[in-house]
């Protein structure tokens, strides 16, 4: 049961940082969606806001860790010039070329949207706090921003998992 | 709830955060497509041989986001701006940024 340094970083990038972000989204989404005065008591809103603030900042940090580890640590191994790198292997075969030209090239760019949008959403929740429960427009706006961050992360995560299946970093 | 955090009294802080993030996303998307059009831009964005131009495209997007956010925040803090308009513009910028990172779109501009 051993792992190379590259495999360990790939796991950290995708299965730890990225996967926790994606899994935590459901909790954050449900928390924001149900943050309504008619559903929760005043004291409950205070407790819920504290939990949301912690959860959303944790997600924003995880999103940053995901893109930073992916771009600066894992990606250079993926795109190395040598013939055995995942990128070289994918491009060498017409049947697998699109995994790079479509999958990887979309993932590597769109993934960066997640931390930027998640940070903005976390900041708004922190700044406005209980006001979110009283203002549907603001709450729904944050929900949309948060959902777009999730969608960007989901695209990156899906292609990351598939690419690592087709051409793993070893 | 303090006055600072009352959205009905001041929506400027939320508008600043949303618009700045949308600009960051749009810049990243724009540079993704522009780097396909201009080989010299692609070279200029290649700050690290190991990572390639991705480092510049995303780096500039993040730097611009981090510059414009405090500016909008300082300008709009404590004020009521037209949040709906700012939010709509932001969603358009995010959609454009997303579109410009979609490979069939940016490859259509590839030289």
Image (tube, coloured by chain):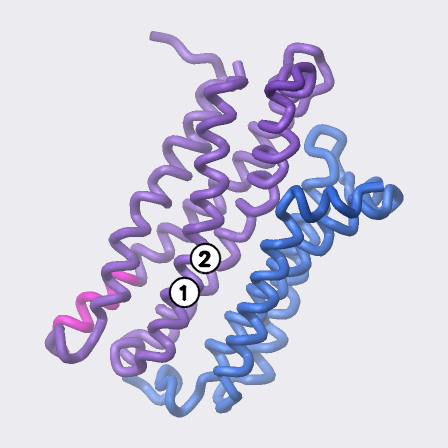
Chain colours: A purple, B blue
Look at the image and give the residue range highlighted in magenta. A42-52
The reply to whether callout 2 and callout 1 are in contact (CB within 8 Å) is: yes
Q: Which residue is farthest top?
A: A1
Q: In this view, does A142 lie above or below B76?
A: above
Element type where label 1 sits in the image: helix
Element type where label 2 sits in the image: helix
What residue do we see at 24% from left, 62% from top?
Answer: A31
Q: Where is residue B23 in the image (x, y as percent from the top left)?
A: 63, 65
Q: In this view, does A114 lie to the left or right of B61?
A: left
Where on the picture, by quarter, is residue B72?
Answer: bottom right
Chain ID, mark 1: A
Distance from label 2 to label 1 (Cα)? 6 Å
Residue A47 counted in the magenta span: yes
Identify residue for label 1: A144
Q: In this view, does A40 lie to the left or right of A14?
A: left
The quarter of the picture where the N terminus of chain A appears is top left
Q: Is residue B52 left or right of residue B88?
A: right
Identify residue for label 2: A148
What residue do we see at 34% from left, 73% from top?
Answer: A139
Majority secondary structure of magenta residues: helix
Where on the picture, by quarter, is residue A40?
Answer: bottom left
Foreground residue among A38 and B110: B110
Q: Where is residue A138 in the image (x, y as percent from the top left)?
A: 37, 77
């Amino acid at each position: 049961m051993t792992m190379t340094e590259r495999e360990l970083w790939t796991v950290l990038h995708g299965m730890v940082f990225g996967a926790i972000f994606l899994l935590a989204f459901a909790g954050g989404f449900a928390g924001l969606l149900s943050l309504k005065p008619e559903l929760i008591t005043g004291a409950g809103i205070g407790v819920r806001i504290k939990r949301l603030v912690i959860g959303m900042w944790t997600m924003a940090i995880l999103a940053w860790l995901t893109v930073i580890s992916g771009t600066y640590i894992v990606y250079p191994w993926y795109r190395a010039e040598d013939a055995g790198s995942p990128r070289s292997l994918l491009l060498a075969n017409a049947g697998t070329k699109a995994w790079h030209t479509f999958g990887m090239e979309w993932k590597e760019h769109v993934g960066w949207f997640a931390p930027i949008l998640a940070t903005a959403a976390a900041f708004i929740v922190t700044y406005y706090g209980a006001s979110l429960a009283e203002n549907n427009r603001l709450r729904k706006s944050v929900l949309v921003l948060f959902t777009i961050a999730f969608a960007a992360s989901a695209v990156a995560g899906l292609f990351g998992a598939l690419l690592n299946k087709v051409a793993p970093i070893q | 709830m303090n006055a600072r955090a009352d959205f009905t009294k001041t929506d400027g802080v939320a508008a600043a955060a949303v618009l700045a993030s949308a600009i960051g996303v749009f810049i990243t998307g724009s540079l993704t497509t522009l780097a396909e059009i201009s080989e010299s831009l692609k070279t200029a964005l290649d700050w690290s041989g190991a990572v390639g131009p991705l480092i510049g495209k995303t780096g500039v997007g993040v730097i611009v986001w981090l510059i414009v956010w405090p500016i909008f925040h300082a300008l709009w803090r404590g004020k009521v701006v037209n949040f709906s308009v700012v939010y709509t513009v932001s969603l358009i910028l995010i959609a454009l940024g997303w579109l410009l990172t979609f490979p069939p779109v940016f490859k259509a501009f590839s030289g």
